[in-house]
Image (spheres, helix red, strand yellow):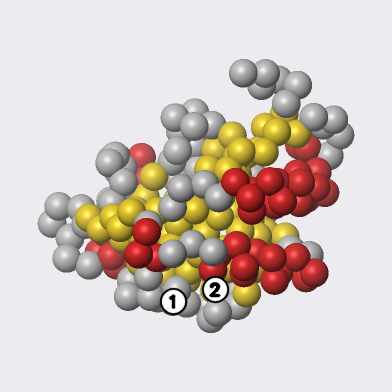
Amino acid sequence: MDSDFFIFDWPEKETAFVKEYCNSFNLEEGAYQYELPLNCNTAQEALDTSHWTFKERMVKPFDSKIIIFDSSDDYDDKLSPLIERMARQCIPAFKDVPNIKVERSAAHFYPEDDGFMGWHTNANYPAWRIYLTYTEEGGKSYISYYDEKTGKEVKSYDNKGITCRAFKLEETPSLMHCVFSQTQRWSLGFKIYNGELNNE
């Protein structure tokens, strides 16, 4: 597995809390965003890499079919210490960092009828990210990324319940990635910083 992309186990005792967090969002109150790239009729076409090279792909603005939510401070305050602990335990770069800063970066819902987020890098927001995804069905959704070392696309499918991933996003080269779902998929994202180096 790529050294800057990790999948790790989420504590079983915290699963109910994450499910409760996801269910706290009202789908009717989120910001629905649906836009396909030009000359594409489906999400599959938008994500298909067979006809272009990753280095030539233009990825701005984001093409997607998602619902976006604002922060939920009550839940974030409770979840951030758990994210900090997982970062320290599961990401070698943070093992001995005394001051880890956690910042919620995303709360997205992907609908079951081909929910997706197109290829992008987040290069303008470099940081390690931890993403918790929650689905009731396994194997029907995934995050896909371009592995610079092999020059190939890698698909990481979601399990039933919670799948926890960490990956590093840099200014250059940055991890190009996308998401596709054929099941209801919740995604909670967090930026992870070394607080000793980021004092803003």
Q: In the image, residue 139 lies at what x, y percent?
A: 52, 78
Q: Residue at x 71, y 69 (%)?
A: 15
Q: In the image, residue 97 lies at what x, y percent?
A: 82, 31
Q: Residue at x 60, y 62 (%)?
A: 21
Determine which quarter of the picture holds residue 24. bottom right
2 vs 72, nearest the viewer: 72
Residue 190 visible, this orientation: yes
Q: Report the residue that reaches farthest toward the left.
A: 39
Residue 47 visible, this orientation: no
Mark with earlier residue (2, 1): 2
Q: Residue at x 38, y 75 (%)?
A: 112
- What amino acid is found at the position of numbered circle 1 in the picture? Thr
Q: In the image, residue 72 lies at what x, y percent?
A: 55, 50
193 vs 20, nearest the viewer: 20
Q: Secondary structure at mark 1?
A: loop
Left or right: 29, with 187 as reference point: left
- Residue behind mark 2: 135
- What amino acid is found at the position of numbered circle 2 in the picture? Thr
Q: In the image, residue 91 lies at what x, y percent?
A: 75, 45
- Residue behind mark 1: 183
Q: Crowdedness of circle 2 by 10 Å Cα count: few (<14), some, many (20+)?
A: many
Q: Secondary structure at mark 2?
A: strand
Q: Point out the image quarter for the C terminus.
A: top right
Label 2 and label 1: CA atoms lie apart by: 7 Å
